[in-house]
Image (tube, rainbow, N blue to C red):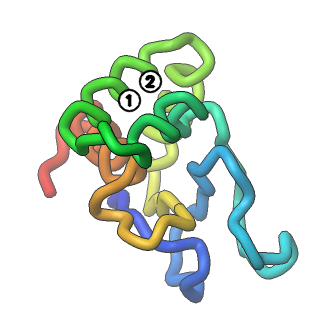
């Protein structure tokens, strides 16, 4: 039982595979993605994503703002579902970003682990 982040382009390595990006990954055909589901509602808003990738974007502030967005009803409902999946088996949060350790996927991983009372 655990939760981890992987790039969606990597070969599947077990667990329930959930894409947590708002946009579909470039160059990836849907039949090649090996997804169990796609949960757009837990991805950062377009506005927040653009701010983060702009000249003023800073990771700590991004993480703070993103955590606040995860409190919205739709995001919270999907986050509850991710936590249920992680509690009952392996959960893989998939993203297309090049550096997952400095992305929304890492923040989401931390939030899921916090809610489950898990450590790294």
Q: Is residue 97 above or below residue 61?
A: below
Instruction: Give percent across and percent down for residue 53.
Output: 43, 48
Instruction: Give percent across and percent down for residue 113.
Output: 26, 43
The picture quadrant where one finds residue 100 is bottom left
Badge 1 is on which residue?
A: 66
Whether the residues at callouts 1 and 2 have beta carbons within 8 Å, the answer is: yes
Counting other residues with Cα less than 10 Å from the Cα at mark 2, is it few (<14), some (14-19), or many (20 or more)? many
Q: Residue at x 43, y 38 (%)?
A: 83
Instruction: Give percent across and percent down for residue 68.
Output: 36, 18
Instruction: Give percent across and percent down for residue 70.
Output: 44, 24
Please state which of the two labelled residues, at mark 1 or mark 2, is closer to the viewer: 1
Cα distance, mark 1 to mark 2?
A: 6 Å
Nearer the observer, 36 or 64: 64
Badge 2 is on which residue?
A: 70
Nearer the observer, 99 or 40: 99
Q: Quadrant of the N terminus?
A: bottom left
Q: Is residue 1 above or below residue 46?
A: below
Q: Residue at x 43, y 15 (%)?
A: 71
């Amino acid at each position: 039982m655990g939760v981890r982040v992987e790039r969606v382009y990597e070969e599947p390595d077990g667990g329930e595979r959930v894409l947590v990006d708002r946009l579909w990954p470039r160059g990836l055909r849907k039949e090649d993605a090996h997804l169990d589901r796609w949960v757009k509602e837990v991805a950062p808003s377009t506005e927040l994503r653009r701010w983060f990738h702009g000249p003023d974007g800073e990771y700590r502030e991004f993480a703070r703002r993103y955590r606040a967005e995860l409190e919205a009803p739709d995001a919270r409902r999907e986050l509850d579902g991710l936590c249920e999946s992680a509690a009952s088996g392996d959960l893989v949060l998939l993203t297309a970003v090049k550096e997952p350790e400095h992305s929304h996927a890492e923040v989401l991983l931390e939030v899921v682990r916090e809610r489950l009372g898990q450590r790294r």
